[in-house]
Amino acid sequence: MSTIKTHIYFVPGLAANSQIFEHLKLPIENFQHHYLEWLLPISKNEPIENYAKRMADLVKENNSILIGVSFGGIMVQEMSKYLNTKKVIIISSVKSRNELPKQLKLIHKLKAYKLFPAGSIETIEDLSTYIFGDFAKKRISQYQKYLSVRDVRYLHWAIFNVLNWKQKVAAQNVLHIQGSDDQVFPMKYIKNCIEIKNGTHIMILNKAKSISKIISENI
């Protein structure tokens, strides 16, 4: 008798491609994997709700699991508002704007992101380098092959929506996995998560074994 598989949809981080999930190991006998790539926004002002609906339309099965990293974690939460999901799992992300660090809140409040010349802050990784300095830069520089989404319209749209995300209350049925050493979304601002010791913002690549274990145990 064949096993009915649970469908899992993966959404990568801002500017990243789905290769960032290549080290996750989930039992293929139980799960069918689907890897989503970023769509281009219809316009620079496309509401995140509209964009999330377009992404949700790519999910073809009811009761699927959504897994997102960083901005992908924000996106799967938005997508879940249009879907019947079994579970939403976010990694190296936030559950509401209340979990954004003070630096990002200040940039949002001052609208300082509008002052950046085109191309100077092109990814959340560049933004984290601007805020947190060389520590973030050294970590991110090791993984440039995963950051292949370079369309300027998409990058500016995505950064705007990280800083302007309106969600104030964490959604239900969200499993949050966060690294203790995340420099983009620091642990001190995060509540109700499973902590990965020594995990950074890019722990999806170097802590994949631990993350895979947590996901398998919770689904």
Image (cartoon, rainbow, N blue to C red):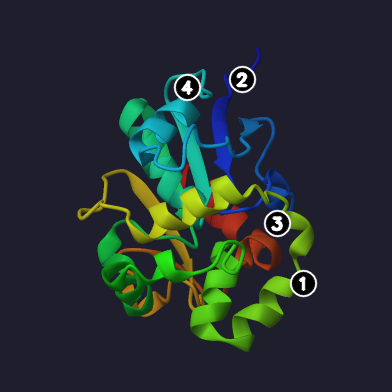
Q: Nearer the viewer, residue 184 or 50?
A: 50
Residue count near mark 1 (Cα–Cα under 10 Å), binned few <14, some 14–19, many ≥20: few
Label number found at residue 3: 2
Q: Nearer the viewer, residue 63 or 46?
A: 46
* Residue 117 percent across, percent down from the top left: 54, 67
Q: Secondary structure at mark 2?
A: loop
Q: Nearer the viewer, residue 58 or 87?
A: 58
Confirm or deny contact between disc 2 and disc 4 (CB under 8 A).
Answer: no
When the figure is inspected, residue 99 is found, relative to residue 63, above or below; the finding is below
Residue count near mark 2 (Cα–Cα under 10 Å), binned few <14, some 14–19, many ≥20: few
Q: Earlier in the sequence, mark 4 or mark 1?
A: 4
Q: Secondary structure at mark 1?
A: loop
Confirm or deny contact between disc 4 and disc 3 (CB under 8 A).
Answer: no
Identify which amino acid the numbered label 3 is placed on: Leu
Instruction: Name the residue beneath numbered marker 4.
Output: 57
Left or right: residue 135 compared with residue 138: left
